[in-house]
Amino acid sequence: MKVKLHTRNFDTEFRMALYGMVEFTMARLVESKRLRNNIAIDVHFRHHSAEGEAMIDHHTNPYRPRHFRVVIDHHRLEVDGYGRERTPTEWAHEVLKTLAHELVHVKQYVMGELSMRKEGLCYRGVHHNVETLSEYYELPYEIEAYGREKGLLIAYLAFWKKISEKFDFSS
């Protein structure tokens, strides 16, 4: 798998954690190593209209996508839903959780569950028309992504703790 991070002002340890999260999550979500080896993911950290979005890269085959762009608006994640400013650790966990959520969508594209068609996004061949926020949370592909994001984060943090104890990223 080819992973590129497009970031500014993230320290080395957090950048390594982000790379690790992509590898860890995709290994859990896409069992086939051969398939994972043919995937390219560009992760961009910048201002965006939502906290995160996973999309098929415009240069890839939309019927069998293998190149993806994930956008995370890390600025939106600095404050929680109650307007409280998150601590640096809380912020980092929220970024990793959002990344896990978007990688679930990448898995859905790779496995052919989610596809982009003329009418919009289709999940397992069915187009879902969304008009309200409550309808958005009832979308089957969002239910899966929200359901898996926290479990992936918790599993990854346990994995990362073991790794970071072995290596010193400060140098």
Image (cartoon, rainbow, N blue to C red):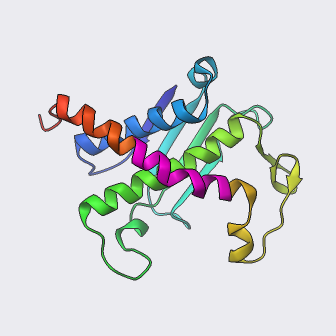
Which sits in the foreground, 143 or 56?
143
Residue 78 % position (x, y): 35, 69
Where is residue 141, by image quadrant? bottom right
User: Was residue 153 drawn as part of the magenta stretch in this picture?
Assistant: yes
Which sits in the foreground, 61 or 127?
127
Residue 161 % position (x, y): 26, 40
The correct choice, above or below, for 103 with respect to 63 in the image is below
User: Was residue 47 drawn as part of the magenta stretch in this picture?
Assistant: no
Residue 37 % position (x, y): 56, 21
Residue found 76% across the figure and 31% down from its top: 64
| Side (left or right) of 108 relative to 116 | left
Q: Is residue 25 visible?
A: yes
Magenta span main SS: helix
| Side (left or right) of 133 relative to 4 | right
Residue found 50% across the figure and 27% down from its top: 2
| Side (left or right) of 58 relative to 26 | right
Which sits in the foreground, 68 or 168?
168
Q: Bounds of the magenta span?
A: 143-155
Residue 155 % position (x, y): 42, 42
**Residue pushed farthest bottom?**
82
